Amino acid sequence: MTIRSSIAVLGAGAWGTALAIHLARNQHRVHLWGRKPEQMHAMQLARCNARYLPETPFPDALTPTADLGVALECADLILIVVPSSGFRAFLRELRPHLASCSARIAWASKGLESGSAKRLDQVFAEELPAHAAPAIISGPTFAREVAAGLPTAVTVASHDCAFAEHVAELLHSPSFRAYRVDDVIGVELGGAVKNVLAIAAGIADGLHFGSNARAALITRGLAEIMRLADAVGGRRETLMGLAGLGDLVLTCTDNQSRNRRFGIALAEGQSVDEALAQIAQAVEGLPSAREAWRLACEHRVDMPITHAVYQVAYEGLAPKLAVAQLLQRHARPEFDQPSVMTD
């Protein structure tokens, strides 16, 4: 086998592992880094991620490690796949290693920073201001299907079009297509807010409201993301693509989505803590609901579905009452809605 590039995938959850497997199959030398030595040692022995993707063996070109220095040694590309809640802290951990590493950075994490509502590209610019423009991988992807080699398409966004093209080429395979865009803001917002709307879709389905309601929620949810993008500098056409509509449809309609399952659990009467314990993985839409609502208030953007999820998750509003509030809103033209909140 001819090795094409050396890639460090940092984050050994389901999504990071799936991307590492895919890239190794693409004849790249891949180091998959995880923080816990015992878990990474178990992956070395089993040649799979027994916790998240037990049915998918690691290609020969994939090496698990808990040593960040080893993972970064000779890397051409650093691909960060850690939860958004720890993104800033991880960049600070990574920073000392970059003095001796010339690799460019990309990430496949999605979310808004807790407490600031900043996008991950904003966090990156604050923590690594001297580093070259990063790339963001987003789109409708479930880890299990990528690991299984099923057909998948994603968006790669960067202000450096040549770098976005390079990352897309690293990912491209007969079953995996990557499209390049330069709208980083739109891609970041689509990836973050769709998780909030997936919680809403789970609540609606958990209350047995049917397919009509789900389709309406997805459509009106997309309108909310577009309005927010308008307010902060993203482009609507980006949200009509893979990183917006594509990811939104996937996450709202399939129970592989942790955020959707979380919403179903809330509708069935579980508390937030009980639902989180049942899923036992990061539910990115939960903190993103708070931060997306913070952005909506800051920019005076009308986002009623996002607000309803925030109220259910953080203010204890019963899911049925949240839905009732949405249904009681005044009728208005579909394409002539105000983009800002009304008092």
Image: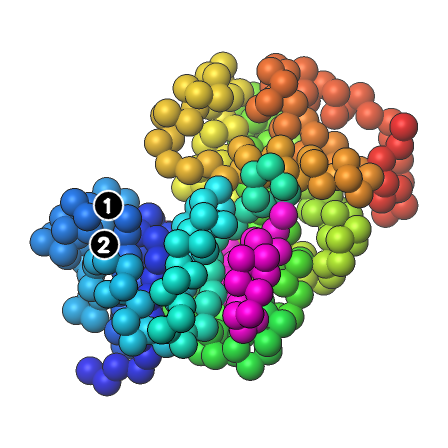
Residue 248 in view (yes/no):
no
> In the rendered structure, does residue 145 fall within the stretch colored magenta?
yes
Which residue occupies 74% across, 32% down?
304
Q: Between residues 297 and 206, which one lies in front from this camera angle?
A: 297
| Residue 158 relative to residue 93: left or right | right
Residue 312: image location, x then y, percent: 61, 22
SS at circle 1: loop
Residue 36, numbered circle? 1
> In the rendered structure, does residue 245 fall within the stretch colored magenta?
no
The outermost residue toward the bottom is 2
Rendered position, 76 above or below 215: below
Which residue occupies 48% across, 21% down?
272
Residue 139 in view (yes/no):
yes
Rendered position, 84 above or below 169: above
Residue 108, numbered circle? none
| Residue 265 relative to residue 281: left or right | right
Graded by Cα atoms within 10 Å as few (under 14), some (14 to 19) or many (20 or more), the crowding at tag 1 reads few
For the residues labelled 2 and 1, the Cα–Cα distance comes to 6 Å
Do the residues under discs 2 and 1 have CB atoms within 8 angstroms?
A: yes
Which amino acid type corresponds to the residue marked 2 in the rendered image? Ala
User: Which residue in the structure is indicated by mark 2?
Assistant: 66
Graded by Cα atoms within 10 Å as few (under 14), some (14 to 19) or many (20 or more), the crowding at tag 2 reads many
Q: Between residues 179 and 192, which one lies in front from this camera angle?
A: 192
Q: Which residues are magenta?
A: 118-146
Residue 27: image location, x then y, percent: 27, 77
